Amino acid sequence: MAAKTLTRMDLSEAVFREVGLSRNESAQLVERVLEMMSDALVEGEQVKVSSFGTFSVRSKTARVGRNPKTGEEVPISPRRVLTFRPSHLMKDRVASGNRS
């Protein structure tokens, strides 16, 4: 089964069909929503989408890693990582899609 990817264009096309905005307005709406989510995450805020999940940024401290090929220790610098925690409804929905 080939994996399909949902794109911005797919989202704006869905807004166009479901809401009735023009294609241009639909694309602008999708872009604005994604921009607002990105801006909030950059500022360190959580983005909670009801019945979907929560996006948040987590700070990871510096640590020592290991190159799996050579076994050599390598320093890993501190960084911020994006995390997603799905809601229980989303978990249940995805799990039910796994059943035949």
Image (tube, rainbow, N blue to C red):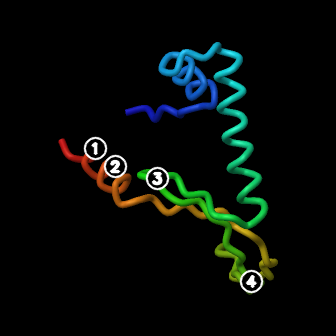
Q: Earlier in the sequence, mark 4 or mark 3?
A: 3
Give the Cα separation between the discs numbered 2 and 3. 16 Å
In percent of width and height, residue 36 lies at 72, 47
Circle 4 — which element? Answer: loop
Q: Label 3 neighbourhood size at 10 Å, few (<14), some (14-19), many (20+)? A: few
Counting residues from the N terminus, which is met first, the one under dot 2 or under dot 3? 3
Q: How dense is the environment of label 4, judged by Cα within 10 Å: few (below 14), some, or many (20 and up)?
A: few
- Labelled disc at residue 94: 2
Q: Amino acid at mark 4?
A: Thr
Residue bearing the label numbered 1: 97
Name the disc covering residue 63, or none. none
* Amino acid at dot 2: Val
- Residue name at image x 60 percent, y 64 percent: 83
The residue that disc 3 covers is: 50
Kind of residue at badge 3: Ser
- Asked if the residues shown at circle 2 and circle 3 are in contact, with their CB atoms under 8 angstroms apart, the answer is no
Q: Are marks 2 and 1 in contact (CB under 8 Å)?
A: yes
Nearest-to-viewer mark from 3 and 1: 3
Q: Quadrant of residue 7?
A: top right
Which residue is pictured at 78% across the width and 78% down the height?
Answer: 76
The quadrant in which the C terminus is found is top left
| CB within 8 Å, label 4 to label 3 | no
Return the residue at label 4. Answer: 61
Q: Is residue 4 left or right of residue 45?
A: left
Q: Amino acid at mark 1?
A: Gly
Vertically, is 62 above or below 35? below
**Separation of disc 1 and disc 4 at Cα?**
37 Å
Mark 4 to mark 3 CA distance (whole Å): 30 Å
